[in-house]
């Protein structure tokens, strides 16, 4: 541990409401030069660059917007940074080749879930970053999402074509669901009623209901989908795919009314809390595209570090 790891807290509603009066920050994991870029979405400018552990592979911001967590695929660690000061506050070891991290307000309080692709498991850390459970996944887990009530976490297993459903109260596996060829990303609707799993290998999205976690539908995508973001107020998904595009998908009909050209090899997408702006990490040209989701238009192209692969936004 590189300092006293900060304590996770339940978000204070009043403080969170005050934070939402200012423009959120978007963080960018730059795997090629071991840095994290911080973008002010009010100006679409990089306002800070932080050194990270080698090969940062995933990011998440705590629900109170106070801490940024980053996992290092090469050093097998998770690090916490103070959002207000852009300083490293602590680092702890996790499993092999971590590829995902998420803070979940579970029935037992705040917990960090770290998805380890190399050891095929999920480490669960408590408020003080002490490991309290190791949950088995299937082969090569990559990404994680949680239901809004914090009772379930879903992890996609790329090499098993499945999703692992975790009961966060007991940190046990509720089941594994077959979803399609090479799932790489997952998102859950704001009302918690549906989960959407991006299958890179078969160019579709598997739609799961979240009572029994059965596949209830499929939505075709363009070739090679990689990541997904769901609009918080509309039945709309944004899916990065191919070499230069983000698809806009109507989740009610499955229609794709438009696609937006972005940079080279879009890897990750994230929406601001209002849903008015989408940010896209373009790995091969070291940029982030800022998109006005009301006009379907790129409004800025922001230079960041080398090989940007993952984005996170303050709630």
Image (cartoon, rainbow, N blue to C red):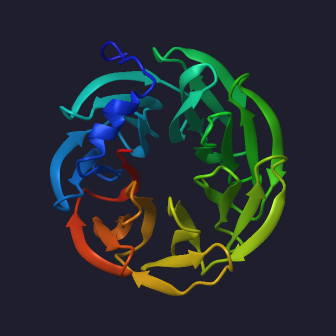
Position of 170 compared to 81: left or right? right
Residue at the outermost bottom position: 257
Q: Quadrant of residue 146?
A: top right
Position of 93 compared to 138: left or right? left
Question: Does the image show residue 65?
Answer: no
Q: Is residue 9 above or below residue 41?
A: above
Residue drawn 60% across the image and 80% down it? 223
Q: Nearer the viewer, residue 278 or 23?
A: 23
Q: Is residue 273 above or below residue 166?
A: below
Residue drawn 67% across the image and 24% down it? 134
Count of numbered badges drawn on the protein: 0
Position of 53 compared to 136: left or right? left
Residue 254: image location, x then y, percent = 67, 79
Residue 276: image location, x then y, percent = 37, 66
Q: Nearer the viewer, residue 96 or 248?
A: 248
Residue 76: image location, x then y, percent = 48, 31
> Which quarter shows the C terminus?
top left
Residue drawn 19% across the image and 58% down it? 42
Q: Nearer the viewer, residue 145 or 286?
A: 145
Residue drawn 73% across the image and 45% down it? 139
Q: Quadrant of residue 44?
A: bottom left
Q: Nearer the viewer, residue 12 or 115?
A: 12
Question: Does the image show residue 79?
Answer: yes
Residue at the outermost front position: 14
> Which quarter shows the N terminus?
top left
């Amino acid at each position: 541990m590189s300092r006293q790891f900060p304590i996770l807290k339940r978000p204070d509603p009043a403080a969170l409401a005050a934070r939402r009066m200012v423009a959120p920050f978007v963080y960018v994991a730059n795997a090629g030069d071991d840095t994290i870029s911080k973008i002010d979405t009010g100006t679409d400018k990089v306002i800070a660059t932080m050194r990270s552990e080698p090969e940062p592979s995933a990011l998440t911001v705590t629900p109170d917007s106070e801490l940024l967590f980053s996992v290092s695929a090469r050093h097998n660690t998770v690090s916490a940074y103070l959002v207000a000061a852009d300083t490293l506050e602590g680092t702890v070891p996790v499993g092999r080749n971590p590829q995902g991290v998420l803070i979940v307000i579970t029935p037992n309080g705040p917990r960090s879930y770290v998805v380890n692709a190399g050891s095929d498991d999920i480490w669960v850390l408590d408020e003080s970053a002490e490991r309290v459970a190791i949950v088995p996944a299937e082969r090569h887990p990559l990404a994680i999402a949680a239901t809004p009530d914090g009772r379930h976490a879903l992890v996609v297993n790329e090499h098993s074509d499945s999703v692992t459903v975790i009961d966060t109260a007991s940190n046990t596996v509720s089941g594994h669901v077959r979803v399609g060829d090479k799932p790489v990303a997952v998102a859950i609707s704001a009302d918690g009623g549906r989960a959407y799993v991006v299958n890179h290998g078969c160019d579709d999205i598997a739609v799961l209901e979240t009572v029994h976690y059965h596949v209830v539908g499929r939505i075709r995508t363009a070739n090679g989908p990689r990541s997904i973001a769901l609009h918080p107020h509309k039945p709309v998904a944004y899916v990065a795919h191919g070499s230069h595009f983000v698809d806009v998908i109507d989740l009610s009909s499955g229609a794709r009314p438009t696609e937006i050209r972005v940079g080279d090899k879009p890897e990750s997408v994230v929406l601001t809390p209002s849903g008015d702006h989408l940010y896209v990490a373009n790995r091969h040209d070291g940029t982030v595209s800022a998109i006005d989701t009301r006009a379907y238009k790129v409004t800025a192209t922001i230079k960041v570090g080398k090989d940007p692969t993952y984005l996170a936004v303050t709630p």
